């Protein structure tokens, strides 16, 4: 059960370097509640994921709690 998607706005993207040297983009979101959890960040997996979603700063996006823990952007809302 992945739960309901919640609409919010993509404010920025932070690029984080993990301990293995892999660079991972993280979405910085307008804070929004998903259930009882306040979410302001979500994983973007990799640059290809961002391209596939065709999301840009300022876009409205749908976010779910993947596996009930990690917020994930599922798609762009509108245009």
Image (spheres, rainbow, N blue to C red):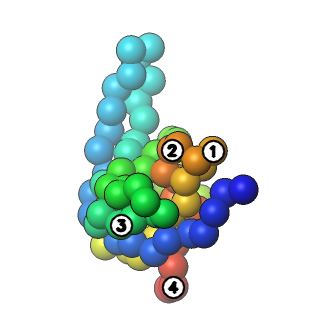
Residue bearing the label numbered 4:
78
Callout 1–callout 2 Cβ contact below 8 Å = yes
Q: Is residue 20 above or below residue 14?
A: above
- For the question of whether residue 53 can be seen, the reply is no
Badge 4 marks a residue whose secondary structure is loop
Residue bearing the label numbered 1:
67
Front of the two marks 1 and 4 = 1
What's the residue at 63%, 44% (across, down)? 67
Q: Is residue 31 above or below residue 58?
A: above
Q: What x and y, as percent, mark residue 57?
A: 32, 66
What's the residue at 72%, 56% (across, down)? 1
Badge 1 marks a residue whose secondary structure is loop
User: Alpha-carbon distance for marks 2 and 4?
Assistant: 24 Å
Badge 2 marks a residue whose secondary structure is strand
Q: For residue 70, which numbered disc appears in the image?
A: 2
Q: What x and y, as percent, mark residue 74?
A: 58, 62
User: Alpha-carbon distance for marks 3 and 2?
Assistant: 14 Å
| Residue located farthest toward the top when viewing the structure as drawn | 20
- Tell which of 75 and 40 is nearer to you: 40
Disc 1 crowd rating (10 Å Cα; few below 14, some 14-19, many 20+) is few
């Amino acid at each position: 059960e992945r739960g309901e998607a919640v609409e919010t706005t993509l404010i920025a993207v932070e690029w984080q370097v993990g301990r293995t040297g892999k660079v991972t983009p993280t979405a910085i979101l307008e804070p929004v509640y998903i259930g009882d959890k306040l979410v302001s960040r979500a994983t973007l997996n990799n640059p290809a994921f961002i391209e596939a979603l065709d999301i840009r700063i300022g876009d409205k996006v749908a976010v779910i709690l993947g596996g009930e823990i990690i917020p994930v952007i599922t798609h762009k809302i509108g245009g």
